[in-house]
Structure formats: C-alpha cells, structure tokens
Image: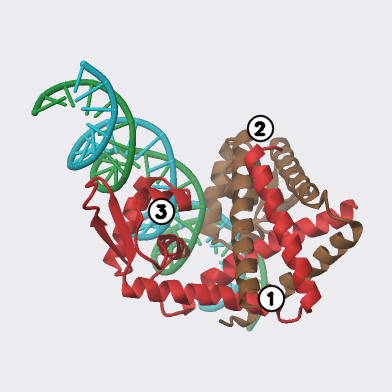
Chain colours: A brown, B red, C green, D cyan
DNA sequence: GCTATATATTTTGATTATCAAAATATTTGC
DNA sequence: GCAAATATTTTGATAATCAAAATATATAGC
C-alpha cells in the first residue's frame, strides 16, 4: 500500500517536471522563441476572442495587477497584445491579442493538443475513458484540498 | 475525439495549477514558512542521507551551479543545510541537511504522501491499478517526447 | 617535478517575475 | 458636488535565474 502510494507520488512529481521541460523546450524551439512560458500563459489568459480587462486577466492568472501591468507592457512592445481604454468606463483597460498574438495562441494550443494525442496514442478506447474518469476525480480532490486548505 | 482530448488537456492544466497552489499553500501554513517551494526542492535534492556535491544537486534540479551557490548560501544562513570541502579533492563541496533540514524534508514528504492518499481515498483497488498504469504510460510518453524533442 | 589542461565551484553583472503599498484617474452614491 | 469605491499604474523591493569571468585544485604528459 505504502509502496504504491510512493510510486504514484514519484510518477506525479516526474510528470509535473516533464511537462514543464517539454513546454519550455517547445517554446524555445518554435516560431515564438522571444516568449517565455509566463508570457504564453498571459496570452492564453487574454484569449482569442475580444478583449479582457486587467482585473479579469490578473484574476485568471492569480497575479497582482502591478505584475500584470509590466507583463502587458512588454507583450505590447513585442507585438502580441494591444491595450485600449473602455469608452463607457475610462478606468477600465481592455487588452486583446494582435494578429501575431492570436497566431502564438493557436500554436501553443496545438502544442498542447499534440501532447495529449501523443499520450493517448497507445491507449484503448476503454483506457481513455478510465483515465478521463481518474483525472476528473483527481481534479475534484485537488480542488477540495485547495478550498478547505487541509494538510 | 477532439472533444475528449480538449477535456483531458484542460484537466491536466488544472491539475498542474492546483498542485502548485496546494504545495505553496501548505508550505506557507506549516512549521517552515520561511522556506519557498524552490528552497524545499533544493532540500529534497540534497536528500536525507549523507551529502551531495554541488554538481550533483545542480544536475538534479536542472539549474546552474551559480544559481545553486546562492540558494545554498541562503539555506545555510537559515539553518537547513551545511557545507564542507571534500578531504580527498579540495575542489569538491559536499552539502548535507542539518537536523532542521531533515525535519523539513520529512514534513514535506508527508505532505506529498497525504496528498496522494487523499487522491486515492475514493478509488477502488482496481482503479488504483489502472491509474498507476496510466501514469506510467503518461510518464514514459512524456520522457520520450522530451528526449526526442518532437513538436 | 613542472606546466598545461581539465574540473569544481564561486563571483559578477544582468534579467525576469513577482509582491505590497502608494499614487492616479474615474465613477458612483448620496 | 463631494466622499467613497473601483480600476489601474507606479514605485521600490526581493527571489530565482543565467552566462561568462574568476578562483582553486587536480591530473596528465613530458
């Protein structure tokens, strides 16, 4: 029992590290090597469609707005984002992806899908279902630990 | 098909973020709130038994030795690590955990085990086996992507 | 046994990501 | 119209990281 838990723990830690490495590597090799993982995640949080406010993006990324301001500044300089003030409420700043930003978004999305496809390639239909169920349970458990703040 | 992959991808991303949050939170709440996640990982890499050289630790953590030097300096100041020069080869620095370092190691290890136990608590024996197999496959796949550097 | 080369580590100088708190600008409620 | 609330940016700081230069020691070849 203890053995199995130890093994699962070790696998989870390794998987976590590998995903990190792969994502980092794939960005550095690809067409958008001027972006860091953090910056890709900011682009992801802005989203393909329309615009988001600074508060919305900072909330999604769980960073302060001060941090986001400098991140957005840099991504505008690099040509991935554009900023505009709301006409109805001049305090609000709307951030959206430029054409280049959308391309980066789509390429990163494809990287993620390719990774999942590679993982699934030698799973049977049934195993896929089981994994999906297990991941859902795992996710719910983690969320409940996170919410209740136990351990 | 596409749908299922999208869902799995989303779950993986959420699980990744949750694990991060939980680990961060558990450290900040616990007896070693003067440690960051990065520092805990350095302590983990040094290990409970005997000592490791700077190169070994930097290799395990995949950081440069320059980065490690400053990290070790700080952990020595905080009382978690100790440093000594090898007698047989005076270029080599051996790093080991202090008593406090070992305690931090054990508590962090327990946190990990508790998390795995919580995750597994509503899995049947059979489901546990399936998850273990799935994680092994996932791990092998990720490693092969990482090695071959595809996508 | 000296000297050149290799190895292990630290130092230096820089960058990125982050935060909390103060400052600024705008809106809303009374 | 003014006080309080809201949205964002600025300021000043810290942690984690790297590459390249510097330092110290060991080893290999003559």
**Label 2 crowd (10 A; few <14 / some 14-19 / many >=20):** few
Q: Nearer the viewer, mark 3 or mark 2?
A: 3
What's the mark number on residue A31?
Answer: 2
Pinpoint the chain carrying mark 3.
Answer: B
Q: Position of residue A75 (x, y in %)?
A: 59, 42
Secondary-structure class at tag 2? loop
Give the residue displayed 55% in from the left and 45% down from the top.
Answer: A73
Assess disc 1: are there few (<14), some (14-19) or many (≥20) residues with their C-alpha within 10 Å of its C-alpha.
some
Q: Left or right: where does residue A98 sit relative to residue B85?
A: right
Q: What chain is tagged by disc 2?
A: A
Task: Point out the tag, 3 or 1, that comes first from the N-terminus.
Answer: 3
Q: Distance between the residues labelled 1 and 2?
A: 38 Å
In what element is the residue under mark 1? helix
Image disc number at residue B119: 1
Q: Which residue is drawn at 80% across and 64% down?
A: A131
Q: Residue at x 59, y 78 (%)?
A: B114
Give the quarter of the figure containing the C terminus of chain B: top right
According to the picture, the residue beneath numbered tag 3 turns out to be: B57
- The picture quadrant where one finds residue C4 is top left
Pointer 3 local density, CA inside 10 Å: few below 14, some 14–19, many at least 20: many
Say if labels 3 and 1 share a chain: yes
């Amino acid at each position: 029992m203890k053995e199995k838990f130890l093994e699962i723990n070790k696998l989870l830690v390794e998987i976590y590290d590998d995903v990190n490495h792969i994502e980092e590597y794939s960005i550095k090799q690809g067409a958008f090597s001027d972006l860091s993982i953090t910056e890709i995640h900011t682009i992801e949080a802005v989203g393909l469609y329309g615009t988001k406010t600074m508060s919305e993006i900072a909330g999604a990324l769980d960073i302060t707005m001060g941090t986001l301001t400098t991140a957005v500044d840099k991504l505008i300089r690099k040509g991935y984002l554009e900023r505009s003030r709301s006409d109805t409420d001049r305090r609000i700043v709307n951030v959206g992806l430029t054409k280049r930003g959308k391309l980066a978004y789509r390429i990163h999305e494809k990287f993620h899908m390719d990774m999942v496809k590679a993982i699934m390639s030698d799973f049977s239909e049934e195993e896929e279902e089981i994994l999906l169920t297990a991941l859902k349970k795992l996710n719910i458990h983690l969320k409940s630990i996170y919410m209740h703040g136990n351990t």
